[in-house]
Amino acid sequence: MDLEQQIQSLLEKGDLQRAASRAVEGYGPEVFGFLVSLVRDTRDASEVFSQTCEDLWVGIERFEGRCSMRTWLYTLARHAAARFRRSPHRRAGRRLALSQVSEIADRVRTQTLPFLRTEAKSELARIREALDEEDRALLVLRVDRGLSWNDIALVFAGDDASKATLERTSARLRKRFQAVKSEIRKRAREAGLLPSSQPAKSKRRAGPVSARTPPGQGS
């Protein structure tokens, strides 16, 4: 039985506490990583993650299964990040005191932070971090997490959005995704990570232009 089935089974039995705890255990590390990428500060991300888990705990009764629990948790995380951005000090230092899910959330943070801190900071990662928040979220959800466009639309529009709203949101995000990829390629060329475009009919001898091609560029 996979994680979604485990959570669904617990929900059907009315065991909401265990369902919430299992969701945080299973999806917490990747959602916390998403929040670190989103807010770009581990302390703030920890605060938002705590709020996300609290929102899950308080709101799990209204989970209707319109999407997977994984997608719903990302939706809660993005909403919690938006609230934190509007009032970053209102909940400073607050931690869950609702149930055992608070201990699980703390454990997830403790186990995930060392991994995030020791990841190599490549030039490509720096390019991604320089994008705006929506574009960073879009890249993480689509490229790193592999969510479907319908699920990504739910994360951006909310799980209570109408079908028409989700369709419009999905279309907008698909278009935006193509623009973001083009922007990343442009910045990668400027940083020397990709070869510069060469004139198709150029017959000139090697000169300053070709000399600027970064060494070690391969296929």
Image (cartoon, rainbow, N blue to C red):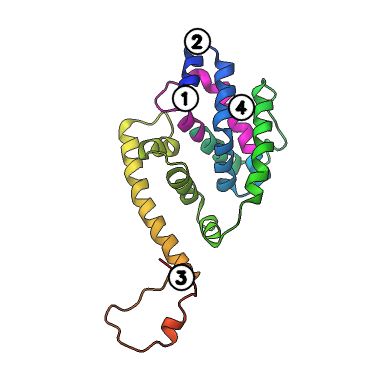
- Quick one: label 4 or label 1, which is nearer the N terminus? 1
**How far separated are the C-alphas under marks 4 and 2?**
21 Å
Residue 218 x/y as whole percent:
43, 68
**How far separated are the C-alphas under marks 2 and 3?**
57 Å
In the rendered view, does 135 fall on the left or right side of 20?
Answer: left
The residue located at (43%, 20%) in the rendering is: 64
In the rendered view, does 200 fall on the left or right side of 66?
Answer: left
Which one is closest to the eye, mark 4 or mark 3?
3
Q: Is residue 50 magenta?
A: yes
Q: Which residue is mark 2?
A: 13
Amino acid at the residue labelled 1: Asp
The residue located at (51%, 31%) in the rendering is: 73
Query: What is the residue that sits farthest to the left in this orientation?
Result: 201
Helix, strand or loop at disc 3?
loop
Which one is closest to the eye, mark 2 or mark 1?
1
Q: Which residue is mark 3?
A: 217
Q: Quadrant of residue 151?
A: top left
Q: Where are the magenta residues, as a range?
A: 47-74
* Quadrant of the snapshot with the C terminus: bottom left
Of residues 137 and 158, which is closer to you in this image?
137
Q: Which residue is mark 4?
A: 54
**How far separated are the C-alphas under marks 4 and 1?**
24 Å
The residue located at (42%, 71%) in the rendering is: 195
- Quick one: label 2 or label 3, which is nearer the N terminus? 2
The residue located at (54%, 57%) in the rendering is: 125
Q: Which residue is mark 1?
A: 2
Residue 116 x/y as whole percent:
63, 46
- Quick one: label 3 or label 1, which is nearer the N terminus? 1
Residue 160 x/y as whole percent:
41, 28
